[in-house]
Image: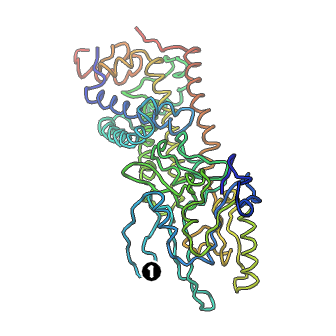
Amino acid sequence: MIERYTFHERLCHWLTGFAYLYCLSTGLAFYSPYLFWLAIMLGGGPTSRYWHPILGLGFVAAAVWMHAIWRGDVDFGKTDREWMDKAKYYATNQDELVPPQGRFNAGQKVFYWAMFYGALLLLLSGLFMWFPEYVPFSLRAIRPVAIVLHECAALITIGAFIIHVYMGVFMVPGSVHAMVSGYVSREWAKTHHRLWYDQVDDRSNPAK
Amino acid sequence: MSNGPLAIKAISGHAGPVAGLDTSRDYELAKLIDVTTCIGCKACEVACLEWNGYPFRETVFDNTYQTMPDLEWNYYNLIRFNEHVGEDGTLQWLMRKDGCLHCADPGCLRACPADGAIVQYTNGIVDFHQENCIGCQYCVSGCPFNIPKFNSETKKVHKCTLCSDRVNVGLEPACIKACPTGCLHFGSKEDMKELAGKRVAQLREHTPHTNAGLYDPAGVGGTHVMYVLHDIDHPERYGGLPKNPQIPLLVRIWKGPLKWIGNLAMVGGIVGVALHYLRFGPKGEEK
């Protein structure tokens, strides 16, 4: 077994995930009357509304922490362009046609940046929604702009989130285990992140 | 003046006809504010506070008569004062009773996400039910008149109820009862428009206010609080009454097409990954 995620990485991931899930559930309740039951399940509308922005700050804080941890691993490079060209083979499980990847492949990096910029946009628009009474009436056009931006940013992260959960739980077996225990099998590492495997395997096992 | 099923048709041993028998009762109601006869006495503000059980506010002084700068969550009704100097150098001291206009197409109600927090009665009153309010203040963003006010302690939004509790039992709103000049009128929207029409004609014919008119803005479907203004082309002189109030376009988009695009995208995403799993299944690993 090879260590893929350190304790801090896993803690950060699940904190971000928990805060995101809470904001997602309560946010969907405010998004549609047909989903308002989510707010009822989570303690009622006022409670949900009270905690939504606070957990939202938690989400952004965790995302910033995550950025500090992973920013060295999520820059786009040559292998990412290659991966993008072969993305259709990746999506159709013809992995033998996909070039070897480093620690994160381009799809994961796209997800990362969608959530990162989504979080920043949600924070910025959310602050205007949290304190609309401080937006002067002469600048009132900002208020609905903030709401629409907040909703669009949320929808983008939801799209990314659906794919993220699907891939982690269903499409790439071993991913959940990796994010819980921190370890992946050598086969898993070789299959999905060959360049990273070569790297860490050299380091942890010079004999190879 | 009772309405609904208990409107009185005949009274035993009563001298004279039943009061108000010939007025229409199956109605949308309206408050008519004739700003040309307002003297800025603030009796309506006091009556509003008394009926709703709120305390008086501290006043501020900035060398104008506007000793209370804005509506508050517990101050539904405020006279706005403006000293307007005309092109010919004449001074007009304008006073307008500000408060919720009870739009026929209320932006607050459209924007609100909480089940039952804002209701519109068939008589036209738009009422906030604080027990269902979640404190998101979307109504603040939806209102083109800057009316709903947030209580940051209770996290609830408040505004003029048009005394729905009084109207429901056949009483006029408290402000109407207190007005000493007859500037405030209350009745069916139809009757109030008729009354306003007469007053506007009178102003045009017998005063220099030849551009007097009724403020009942069509952009929000008309309102159930209407104003007679000296100059209908310049409502903004009366403490910022908007000339052509509209529910913000983005609020309409947000509550209209954006919802359905978003719903389709989310359902589409979930269906999409499910189909993907059925078609391609999980990834294998090389051994």
Residue B222: quadrant of the picture: bottom right
Subunit of label 1:
B
User: Is the residue B211 above or below the residue B178 in the image?
Assistant: below
Q: Quadrant of the C terminus of chain B?
A: top left
Residue A106: quadrant of the picture: top left
Residue at the (53%, 13%) spot, across then down: B281
Pick whichever, A56 or B207, lies toward us: B207
Residue at the (30%, 18%) spot, across then down: A183
Task: Using residue B214 as the reference point, say whether residue B53 is left or right of it.
Answer: left
Q: Secondary structure at mark 1?
A: loop
Estimate the x, y position of residue B85 in percent, counting from the top left: 57, 86
Pick whichever, A100 or B118, lies toward us: B118
Q: Quadrant of the N terminus of chain B?
A: bottom right
Residue ranking furthest to the bottom: B89
Estimate the x, y position of residue B72 in percent, counting from the top left: 44, 61
Name the amino acid, label 1: Thr
The color scheme shown is: rainbow
User: Is the residue B68 above or below the residue A29 in the image?
Assistant: below
- Asked whether residue B235 is in view, the answer is yes
Write down the residue under mark 1. B64
For disc 1, the neighbor class at 10 Å (few under 14, some 14 to 19, many from 20) is few
Residue ranking furthest to the front: B13
Residue A4: quadrant of the picture: top left
Estimate the x, y position of residue B273 in percent, counting from the top left: 55, 22
Q: How many marks?
A: 1
Task: Using residue A116 as the reference point, say whether residue B176 is left or right of it.
Answer: right
- Asked whether residue B250 is in view, the answer is no
Estimate the x, y position of residue B129 in percent, counting from the top left: 51, 46
User: Is the residue B184 above or below the residue B129 in the image?
Assistant: below
Residue at the (44%, 29%) spot, across then down: A41
Pick whichever, A118 or B14, lies toward us: B14
Task: Using residue A94 as the reference point, say whether residue B16 is left or right of it.
Answer: right
